[in-house]
Image: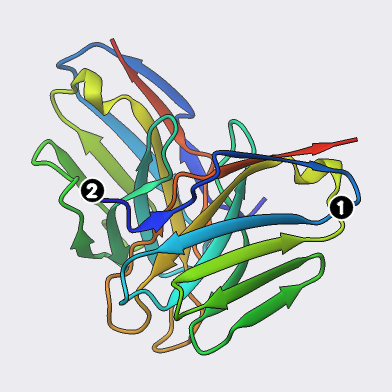
């Protein structure tokens, strides 16, 4: 039972344009969300996070939007650069006293085309 | 480099053998996590420690798996009587948690790729 779903296995975007990666979750106890980026043969690298008390968090070229009623979040990368080509994972956890392990989606492979 | 380190990076073993992996977290981090990742999947949580105490275990952590963090610093993950289904990338992560800080980022190491033949 996938509690965190990334329904697009891959996404191709032209350099300089906006990349939008989507993530849906089913567990209503999740209230902290993270995005990770992974290159081949490396561990996931933390990008940006958001708590459920917010609906937007921005860090440079990366912005995460959270729609709690729809149980949906998205990661926007603008402008997209060649180095952004990687697999992006959405992850979630229960904030506060809940379980501490992260629950990950299957990932979306982002390909930035020159 | 003060990131999370893991050793070895690759391990090939025969079915039935025991293997042990080591993780060294970021030095000031008090929490350490183990995850497993198979092809086409995201990382799956196995277990975590706060200092030397093992506080949570996933149902994925069968009796053949044991993890320790004896002095609250490095950790080891041992798999006994390995099976082909144990072939995966084993990832370690660490974080610093102080009460209800509101920040829950975990920082991952490069992983140990296990192949069971």
Q: Is residue A4 above or below residue B8?
A: below
Q: Residue at x 35, y 36 (%)?
A: B21
**Measured Cα–Cα span from mark 1 to mark 2:** 45 Å
Q: Would you identify the image quadrant in which residue A97 lies?
A: bottom left
Q: Mark 1 — on which chain does it sit?
A: A
Q: Mark 2 — on which chain does it sit?
A: B
Q: Which secondary structure lies at badge 1?
A: loop
Where does the image place residue B86, in percent across and percent down from the top left?
25, 27
Where does the image place residue B67, in percent across and percent down from the top left?
23, 48
Q: Is residue A105 above or below residue B27?
A: above
Q: Identify the residue under disc 2.
A: B67
Q: Residues within 10 Å of mark 2 (few under 14, many from 20)?
A: many
Query: Seen in the image, is A19 located left or right of residue B11?
Result: right
- The residue nearer to you, when weighing A39 against B20, is A39
Q: Residue at x 44, y 72 (%)?
A: A71
Q: Would you identify the image quadrant in which residue B11 lies?
A: top left
Query: Seen in the image, is A73 located left or right of residue B67?
Result: right
Q: Residues within 10 Å of mark 1 (few under 14, many from 20)?
A: some
Residue B96 in view (yes/no):
no
Where does the image place residue B77, in percent across and percent down from the top left?
28, 42
Q: Which secondary structure lies at badge 2?
A: strand
Q: Which mark is residue A3?
A: none
Q: Residue at x 31, y 69 (%)?
A: A27
Where does the image place residue B13, in percent across and percent down from the top left?
29, 15
Query: Seen in the image, is B27 located left or right of residue A10?
Result: left
Q: Residue at x 43, y 84 (%)?
A: B98
What colour scheme has been applied to the protein in the rendered image?
Answer: rainbow
Same chain letter for marks 1 and 2? no
Q: Identify the residue under disc 1.
A: A17
Residue B63 in view (yes/no):
yes
For the view shown, which residue lies furthest in the front direction? A70
């Amino acid at each position: 039972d996938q509690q965190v779903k990334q329904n697009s296995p891959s996404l191709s975007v032209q350099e300089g344009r906006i990349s939008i990666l989507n993530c849906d979750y089913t567990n209503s106890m999740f209230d902290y969300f993270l995005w990770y980026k992974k290159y081949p043969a490396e561990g996931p690298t933390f990008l940006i996070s958001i708590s459920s008390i917010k609906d937007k968090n921005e860090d440079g070229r990366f912005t995460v939007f959270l729609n709690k009623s729809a149980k949906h979040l998205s990661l926007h990368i603008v402008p997209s650069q060649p180095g952004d080509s990687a697999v992006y994972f959405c992850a979630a956890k229960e904030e506060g006293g809940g379980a501490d392990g992260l629950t990950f989606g299957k990932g979306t492979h982002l390909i930035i085309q020159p | 480099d003060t990131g999370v380190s893991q050793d070895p990076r690759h391990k090939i073993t025969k079915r039935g053998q025991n293997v042990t992996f080591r993780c060294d977290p970021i030095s000031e981090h008090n929490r350490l996590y183990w995850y497993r990742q198979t092809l086409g999947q995201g990382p799956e949580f196995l277990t975590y420690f706060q200092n030397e105490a093992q506080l949570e275990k996933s149902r994925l952590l069968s009796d053949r798996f044991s993890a320790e963090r004896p002095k609250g610093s490095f950790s080891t993950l041992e798999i006994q009587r390995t099976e082909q289904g144990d072939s995966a990338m084993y990832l370690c992560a660490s974080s610093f948690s102080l009460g209800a800080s509101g920040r829950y980022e975990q920082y991952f190491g490069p992983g140990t790729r296990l192949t069971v033949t």
